[in-house]
Amino acid sequence: MEENKYDWMAYFESIKEVCPWSWSAVLSGAIDIQHWHSQVENLDINKARLYIAPNHNPRQLKKICSRLNRERAHEEWLWSHPKYGHGSTPTPVLIQQDRHSLEKARKNLKNNGFSK
């Protein structure tokens, strides 16, 4: 399966300086990784979900994220594409996160001296 094709633990370890919460989340099993199938699931107990979308270009990913951010205001949708290099995912993905939790994590980082 596509989600097993990549070393996701190595990826999350490589971005822990810019996204420290993701490292602890992946270690605790709170990040779900699955193939994009155009049907969005609720996060439930997960902190985030990566939908692998290997056949999508950056423009398509951005368009999907914009739509989902409008339709699902309680979530924040991001995307990543390997075309952009350092810190990018090894394959195109859509990232689903709980908006409140993400804002709280960002605020904690800012309060602890980290900036975006």
Image (spheres, rainbow, N blue to C red):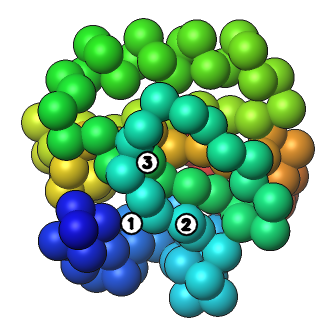
Type of the residue with mark 1: Ile
Residue 96 coordinates in the image, percent (x, y): 60, 43
Please state which of residues 38 and 113 is positioned toward the viewer in this rendering.
38
Type of the residue with mark 2: Asp
Label 3, label 1: how far apart the Cα atoms are = 18 Å
- At label 1, counting other C-alpha atoms closer than 10 Å, the crowd grade (few under 14, some 14-19, many 20 or more) is some
The residue located at (81%, 23%) in the rendering is 73
Circle 1 sits on which residue?
15
Q: Earlier in the sequence, mark 3 or mark 1?
A: 1
Circle 3 sits on which residue?
51
Counting labels gives 3
Query: To which quarter of the image does residue 92 belong?
Result: top left
Query: Which mark identifies residue 65?
Result: none
Label 1, label 2: how far apart the Cα atoms are = 17 Å
Quadrant (top left/top right/bottom left/bottom right) for the C terminus: top right
Label 2, label 3: how far apart the Cα atoms are = 8 Å
Circle 2 sits on which residue?
32
- At label 2, counting other C-alpha atoms closer than 10 Å, the crowd grade (few under 14, some 14-19, many 20 or more) is some
Residue 14 higher or lower than 108, as above or below: below
Q: Quick check: marks 2 and 3 in contact, CB under 8 Å?
A: no
Quadrant (top left/top right/bottom left/bottom right) for the N terminus: bottom left
* Viewer-nearest of discs 3 and 1: 3
Local SS, label 1: loop
* Viewer-nearest of discs 1 and 2: 2
The residue located at (61%, 37%) in the rendering is 40
Type of the residue with mark 3: Tyr
The residue located at (51%, 44%) in the rendering is 95
Residue 34 coordinates in the image, percent (x, y): 43, 58
The residue located at (67%, 45%) in the rendering is 41
- At label 3, counting other C-alpha atoms closer than 10 Å, the crowd grade (few under 14, some 14-19, many 20 or more) is many
Judge left or right: residue 116 versus residue 60: right
